[in-house]
Image (tube, grey):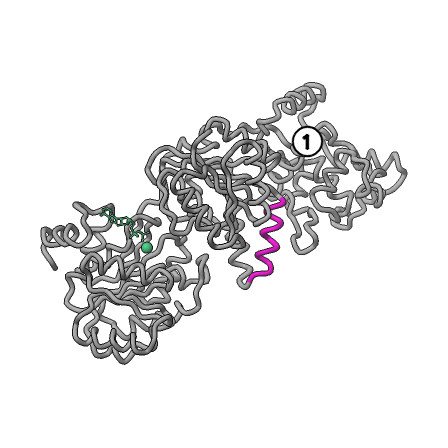
């Protein structure tokens, strides 16, 4: 193993740095000890040096598998500029170019060889003729269908450990949950790899989630105390980026749209102007941000719910690279969830996408420290609540939501589980519209029993009920709201339901307090059975017909 001073001198000589960042030294030592390694470190953490530096000190070549053909040339140019003998092989080269690289390999003129996974099989013969001292698999999450960026060509990489059983292999990635991590090790045949997990905690980023209603208004308020700060607003659709940018310009903000449909020159200009602070706000699809190095992005807003936590983390991670306090704001709307469900349904690996979307939803709907949830996704546990997310700063208070739940559940029962959230709320609030009248819902006993609560609050409460398992959405049946096993406990066994108080509407709370003062009992109907009997008596029919639902038949 090279001596410590020698390693540090190499770091200085070839890379210009005086010291290592967290984990780099430990990883490099582990490579020299001959271990296989799995490195999980956020983007910008400094993964490259972990294999580039050992490459310089090991006798043979270091083989680097990298998926980004477009960036390979830049990476290699950068290394060569530092006096490092590096080369790449990929499909963009002519046969002649490739042969001259093979010759250089045999002549030991190359220390680092970058290869696209697709090109690896062509190298099989040449690799048998040279000494390979280290294998690095960069962006290793691409191997896993569990990851968010699956590349089929990566799945062949298990070959490497078979061909070079005694050569240390290092797999590196910025984003991998536990399942992905296990999958990476399994597929690369490095089950005994030493794992190095860097902290994903970006303490300088505040985290906030708000309901996605009146978003433009909320954004303008948000910007009020940030008149000149640079920021990015991520939207799901190209159209939304355009509309939003225009609305912001109309309010005097220097905002531009950025998405894959914008012509190349214009895109490059927006990016450059943003980096140079001559554009303050970019409204963008997720196409924006890859490889952008701007340290003073002060805030990131998600206009729509991202489809998974990996993406969300990467996007908010573009704020505050300089380490100064920066804000992030996520708008959460039910409509987005439905939209993303549909995308997931159409995608190749539906189950994985849906599971990931579910985690994203749990984050957005959390009533406890958000940072804990975010970090736990990356396998990192923090002891204390973070104190820098909306939940920590203003913890929810809970109300007795039993009446609210009973009203919602009995309405769902009466409309025979045939309607989506919107219509359920319409019935609860006694709306006079076609959705209600066409089906005669105005005749139902529960029609209008929830008119003391605003439409929007009903929406929030019902989402909470769904999250607690009292209701479910049948996504495959036009998003109809349906009862669950747990619903019945509320309907028949008097189960108490606790709901988080909707802070923005203090008035509502006051009404509830008023109500519960008026009614002697805490619940609207001490026993729902009693209500049914009463209704049945009034109508002169058997009780179960009031609900007209076989599942409720005794
Ligand atoms: P990653 O691959 O983890 O996203 P990179 O390897 O591209 O990160 O490194 C990100 C940036 O950090 C680069 O500009 C790199 O030169 C710099 N860097 C890496 N290690 C150090 C170090 N020990 N000291 C200072 N800068 C470093
Ligand atoms: Mg990297």
Q: Position of residue 135 (x, y in %)?
A: 26, 66
Element class at badge 1: helix
Q: Position of residue 388 (x, y in %)?
A: 41, 32
Q: Is residue 86 visible?
A: yes
Q: Position of residue 161 (x, y in %)?
A: 29, 70
Q: Is residue 421 left or right of residue 210?
A: right
Q: Is residue 543 visible?
A: no
Residue positioned 16% across, 72% down in the render: 108
Residue of label 1: 403
Vertically, is 554 above or below 508? Answer: below
Magenta region, mostly helix, strand or loop? Answer: helix
Give neighbour class at mark 1: few <14, some 14-19, many 20+ (Cα, 10 Å). many
> What is the span of residues highlighted in magenta in the rendered image?
335-347
Image quadrant of ligand 2 equals bottom left
Give the quarter of the image for residue 514.
Answer: top right
Give the quarter of the image for residue 185.
Answer: bottom left
Along the line of sight, the residue nearer the viewer: 168 or 494: 168
Vertically, is 267 above or below 254? Answer: below
Q: Is residue 430 left or right of residue 466?
A: right
Residue positioned 79% across, 43% down in the render: 435
Q: Is residue 386 left or right of residue 253?
A: left
Q: Name the quadrant of the N terminus.
A: bottom left
- 338 in the magenta segment: yes
**Number of marks in the image?**
1
Q: Position of residue 107 (x, y in %)?
A: 16, 75
Q: Is residue 230 left or right of residue 366?
A: left
């Amino acid at each position: 193993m090279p001596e410590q001073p020698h390693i540090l001198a190499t770091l200085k000589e070839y890379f210009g740095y005086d010291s290592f960042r967290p984990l780099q030294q430990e990883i490099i030592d582990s490579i020299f000890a001959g271990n296989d390694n799995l490195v999980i470190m956020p983007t910008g953490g400094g993964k490259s040096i972990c294999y580039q530096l050992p490459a310089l000190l090991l006798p043979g070549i270091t083989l680097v598998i990298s998926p980004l053909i477009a960036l390979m040339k830049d990476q290699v140019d950068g290394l060569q500029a530092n006096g490092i003998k590096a080369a790449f092989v990929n499909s963009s080269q002519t046969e002649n170019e490739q042969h001259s690289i093979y010759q250089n390999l045999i002549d030991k003129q190359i220390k680092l060889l970058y290869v696209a996974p697709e090109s690896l099989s062509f190298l099989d013969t040449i690799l048998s003729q040279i000494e390979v001292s280290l294998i690095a698999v960069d962006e290793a999450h691409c191997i896993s269908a569990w990851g968010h960026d699956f590349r089929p060509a990566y799945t062949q990489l298990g070959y490497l450990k078979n061909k070079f059983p005694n050569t240390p292999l290092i797999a590196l990635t910025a984003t991998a949950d536990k399942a992905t991590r296990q999958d990476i090790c399994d597929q690369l045949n490095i089950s005994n790899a030493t794992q190095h997990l860097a902290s994903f905690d970006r303490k300088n980023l505040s985290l906030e989630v708000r309901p996605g209603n009146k978003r433009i208004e909320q954004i303008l308020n948000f910007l009020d105390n940030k008149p000149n700060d640079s920021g990015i607003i991520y939207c799901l659709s190209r159209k939304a980026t355009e509309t939003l940018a225009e609305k912001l310009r109309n309010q005097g903000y220097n905002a531009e749209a950025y998405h894959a449909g914008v012509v190349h020159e214009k895109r490059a200009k927006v990016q450059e102007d943003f980096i140079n602070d001559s554009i303050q706000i970019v409204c963008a699809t997720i196409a924006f941000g890859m490889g952008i190095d701007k340290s003073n992005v002060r805030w990131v807003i998600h206009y729509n719910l991202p489809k998974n936590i990996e993406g969300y983390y990467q996007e908010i991670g573009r704020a505050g690279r300089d380490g100064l306090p920066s804000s992030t704001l996520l708008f959460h709307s039910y409509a987005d969830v439905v939209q993303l469900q549909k995308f997931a349904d159409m995608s190749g690996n539906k189950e994985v996408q849906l599971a990931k979307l579910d985690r994203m939803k749990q984050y957005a709907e959390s009533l406890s420290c958000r940072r804990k949830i975010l970090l736990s996704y990356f396998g990192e546990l923090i002891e204390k609540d973070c104190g820098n997310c909306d939940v920590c700063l203003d913890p929810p208070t809970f109300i007795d939501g039993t009446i609210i739940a009973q009203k919602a559940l009995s309405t769902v029962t009466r409309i025979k589980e045939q309607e989506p959230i919107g219509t359920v709320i319409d019935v609860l609030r006694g709306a006079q519209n076609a959705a209600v009248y066409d089906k005669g819902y105005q005749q139902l006993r529960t029609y209008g029993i929830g008119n003391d609560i605003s439409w929007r609050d009903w929406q929030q409460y019902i989402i909470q009920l769904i999250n607690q398992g009292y209701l479910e959405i049948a996504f495959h049946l036009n998003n109809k709201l349906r009862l669950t096993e747990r619903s019945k406990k509320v309907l028949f066994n008097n189960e108490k339901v606790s709901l988080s108080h909707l802070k923005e509407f203090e008035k509502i709370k006051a009404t509830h307090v008023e109500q519960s003062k008026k009614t002697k009992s805490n619940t609207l109907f001490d026993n729902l059975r009693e209500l049914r009997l009463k209704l049945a008596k009034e109508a002169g029919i058997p009780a179960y017909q009031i609900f007209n639902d076989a599942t409720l038949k005794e």
